[in-house]
Amino acid sequence: MSQTWENARPKNMDLTHLSKQSPIIIVGAGAFGLSSALYLALAGYSNVTVFDKQPYDKNAYSTAEGADAASADFNKVMRMSYGDELDYQRFAWDAIQIWSLWNKQISSSLPENLPHGLKPSDKIWYNCGFLRMSTDGSLSPFEESTLRNITREGLRSTQFVIGNKDDEKRAPFYFRKGEWGNKRDPFHRQRQGKSLAGVFDSSAGYVDASKACTWVMHICRQYGVRFVLDEKEGQVCSFTKSPAGNKTVGIRTGSGREHRSEFLILAAGPWTPYLFPAISPLMETTVGSVVYFRLPPKEKAPGLWDRFSPENFPVFAYGGWTKGLGIGGFPRTADGIVKIGYRGVKYTNYEEVQDKVTGTKHRISVPKTKYWPEPSEPAITKQAVQAIKSVVREALPELAELGIAGCRNCWYTDSLDTNFVIDHVPGDEGMMVCSGGSGHGFKFLPVLGKEVVNIIEKPAEKSAIAKLWQWRTKASGPKNGLEEGEAGPRNWKKQEMATEKDWEFDQKAKL
Ligand SMILES: Cc1cc2nc3c(=O)[nH]c(=O)nc-3n(C[C@H](O)[C@H](O)[C@H](O)COP(=O)(O)OP(=O)(O)OC[C@H]3O[C@@H](n4cnc5c(N)ncnc54)[C@H](O)[C@@H]3O)c2cc1C
């Protein structure tokens, strides 16, 4: 790996119809749009403009200040463990190297050289490790293939299988004093006489998503990318087409203005199918559920702050990863928030949507966030709350004593087969879709755009991973539930939503 992350830019540029000065529009300043913008600028494209309907330069992607996107969040898992998906494993490993370099760049910056929302003491990548704890005493086939592929790449020393004699022996040397003990069984299963089986991946951890986006927007600007971040002027309402109707040539924004593009990248996250409904056979907007626990002030509960710190507590998946309960969580944030998510069921929200160009009507799943289409109180499903509560009761009773402090529906796009969708729109040489993160896209923020540029410039010479993302209408494996459509059981309208009463645990808070 090169020592400067900028060297990761794509080589051997062979431009087709685009010149370096061609106007390129990116719709969406989430992880996918930002990474695309960054690598286009690094590749020398000098006329790149990102449009987003949200004022990220003012709210620094902070959800507390109203930022509303999958990429605006406290934390996202950074892992290279990908089962038998070796291409993703390698891609994630490359990303980790750049996350580490970015941490160094931030810490060595002067405060006045950092954007609003970032200071030199901030980290965007926390290498606290990822514990995938099995609850049935055995490792899943996913873990076994991950171990095989990580061994194959010469990185087995980063993995610690609980109960494996060699790993147990070297673990205390690898970790800081006492840390292995805390991260090996943070749920105190052994003390309760329960099985202890799982894998601790020491190469993994989490990234501070909001701060990471703020950082990447900052470096994009340094490389000349322009941002239009505004509810009206930044909001893309429709696409303009060439007279023959076969090429996207620009956008019309909420203010009514038109902007011309030679090439457009649609990276609107969960709003992608809403803006471009024709993609719906390939991609569906879904929602994962998240709850927050707030630790009492540090001076009142120093033990809890210590226990849940990234130094002592890992990112976790309880019940494993693929075969698990769909419950995972993070160490506390600097403000004392512990986030736990439920992805056992990802819900859909079907509405009638009119294609902004053709006028055709479609029934597709669209986001229903705290702010869009209009402000509303967030409620997550009873099913999600019950699943999280049952794991918290069993594994993290200290949090049960505190009670749930808040919740969020986090909207994103799932593709047919959980591979991203990054490719030219067939029959439209002016447009590409860059979305379908399928719940695992954020970690690739430092590297994704490199592939985007390669796909734009050399569509016929895609890398192995980019081939997974190409336009497709059939899944080679399971269809990820997309075939269920509106009639399926995940439809939000069929769910019972949790009230704050449902958030309550049996115990009362003791603090
Ligand atoms: C609950 C949950 C947990 C996740 N966990 C992980 C994880 O642990 N690790 C991981 O790697 N990934 C994870 N992901 C996935 C990751 O968050 C996404 O893959 C990634 O953030 C998607 O980025 P994006 O840019 O495609 O979309 P977004 O971040 O949603 O950005 C889309 C942007 O488009 C803008 N936009 C939309 N419509 C318009 C318009 N009309 N005009 C202008 N702008 C518009 C929006 O304002 C937004 O800024 C998770 C996702 C969720 C929801």
Image: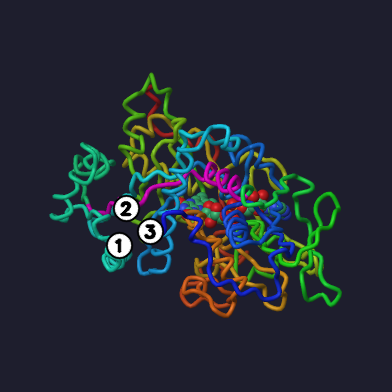
Q: Which image quarter is the C terminus in?
A: top left
**Can residue 358 be seen in the rendering of this structure?**
yes
The amino acid sitting under disc 3 is: Met
> 254 or 287, which is in the foreground?
254
Q: Earlier in the sequence, mark 3 or mark 1?
A: 3
Gap between marks 3 and 1 measured at Cα: 12 Å
Percent position of residue 413, x then y: 58, 60
Percent position of residue 510, x then y: 37, 23
Gap between marks 2 and 3 measured at Cα: 13 Å
The amino acid sitting under disc 1 is: Glu
Q: Which residue is mark 2?
A: 132
Q: Earlier in the sequence, mark 2 or mark 3?
A: 3
Q: Which residue is mark 3?
A: 80
Q: Earlier in the sequence, mark 2 or mark 1?
A: 2
Q: Is residue 86 left or right of residue 122?
A: left
Q: Is residue 207 magenta?
A: yes
Residue at image point 58% right, 48% down? 219
Q: Is residue 79 magenta?
A: no
Asked whether the residues under the numbered discs 2 and 1 touch, taking CB atoms below 8 Å apart as contact, a structural biologist would say: yes
Mark 1, residues whose alpha carbon is within 10 Å: few (<14), some, or many (≥20)? many
Q: Is residue 242 above or below residue 505?
A: below
- Residue range in magenta is 197-220
The amino acid sitting under disc 2 is: Arg
Q: Is residue 419 left or right of residue 329?
A: right
Residue at image point 65% right, 68% down? 280
Disc 1 Cβ-to-ligand 1 distance below 8 Å:
no
